């Protein structure tokens, strides 16, 4: 992957930064295949357990006081945000990233966005350079990458699919907002790419289109472990208007 592409993504923030590896290569520690999280649900459950323990430690409480569904939602939101941010930014900047589930590597770390590595991409087709909403990439990425991760989490902890797909919508909107803020020259394209993501039938439950005032139709549940309780909702949460002053 060209170093200028890597640098342009990293400049947008840690959720956008991507390492690269040769296509078809096998990962070596500390790199691991991302597909292990869906092929082996026990490994996803281990990750949920690690997040649960970290949330408990941060709040100075026993891990048993952290609901598994909250830990699952927090893990899921962080993971999909980590995957969607570079995907959206690359498409807004007319770069191609190979974000197929079987080709991605990750590192099992806590305390920030997990390290992510993608194969060096081929040149973008001309149609994608002309129209940020053209082509099947958004739908394919949602169906082939985000959906398996979402289904795995939903199968392990009692968290509503509506919450999880709301996490996806929030991650898409947040990535577009960050790109528009850091790179105003890409803002229009970033919001167009976000709108293309929202065209997925899987996000049909969202009442609001992407944009600076987007509000998701569900809650990620993070407020349930916050010291301020319900008042600690996120800015785009469906509950936010109830607690605004």
Image: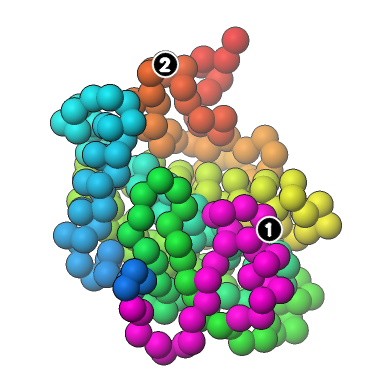
Left or right of 85 in this view: 221: left
Looking at this view, is 238 or 245 the one in front?
245
Q: Residues within 10 Å of mark 1 (few under 14, many from 20)?
A: some
Residue found at x 28% / y 64%: 37
User: Which residue is tagged 2?
Assistant: 228
Label of residue 187 in the image: none
User: In terms of secondary structure, what is the magenta stretch mainly?
Assistant: loop
Q: Quadrant of the C terminus?
A: top right
Q: Which residues are magenta?
A: 1-28
Residue found at x 27% / y 69%: 36
**Can residue 223 be seen at all in this image of the molecule?**
yes
Rendering coords of residue 122 (x, y %): 61, 87
Mark 1 or mark 2: name the one nearer the start of the chain: 1
Taking the spot 67% from the left edge, 55% from the top edge, the residue there is: 12
- Quarter assignment of residue 126: bottom right
Spot the residue most to the front.
29
Let me know if residue 23 is in the magenta part.
yes
Return the residue at label 1.
Answer: 11
Q: Is residue 120 above or below residue 225?
A: below
Foreground disc of the pair 1, 2: 1
- The image position of residue 218, as x and y in percent, is 44, 35
Q: CA distance from mark 1 to mark 2?
A: 33 Å
Q: Quadrant of residue 88?
A: bottom right
Q: Secondary structure at mark 2?
A: loop
């Amino acid at each position: 992957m060209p170093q200028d592409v890597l640098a342009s993504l990293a400049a947008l923030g840690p959720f956008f930064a991507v390492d690269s590896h040769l296509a078809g290569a096998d990962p070596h520690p500390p790199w691991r295949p991302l597909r292990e999280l869906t092929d082996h649900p026990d490994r996803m459950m281990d990750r949920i357990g690690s997040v649960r323990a970290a949330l408990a430690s941060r709040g100075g409480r026993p891990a048993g006081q952290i609901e598994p569904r909250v830990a699952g939602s927090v893990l899921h939101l962080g993971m999909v945000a980590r995957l969607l941010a570079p995907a959206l930014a690359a498409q807004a900047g007319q770069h191609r990233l190979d974000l197929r589930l079987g080709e991605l590597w990750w590192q099992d770390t806590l305390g920030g966005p997990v390290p992510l590595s993608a194969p060096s991409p081929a040149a973008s087709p001309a149609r994608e350079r002309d129209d940020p909403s053209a082509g099947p990439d958004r739908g394919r990425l949602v169906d082939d990458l985000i959906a398996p991760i979402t289904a795995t989490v939903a199968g392990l902890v009692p968290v509503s699919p509506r919450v999880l797909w709301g996490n996806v919508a929030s991650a898409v909107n947040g990535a577009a907002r960050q790109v528009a803020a850091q790179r105003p020259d890409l803002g229009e394209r970033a919001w167009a790419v976000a709108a293309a993501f929202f065209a997925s039938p899987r996000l049909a439950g969202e009442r609001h289109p992407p944009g600076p005032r987007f509000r998701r139709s569900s809650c990620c549940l993070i407020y349930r472990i916050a010291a301020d309780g319900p008042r600690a909702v996120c800015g785009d949460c469906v509950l936010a208007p109830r607690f605004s002053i």
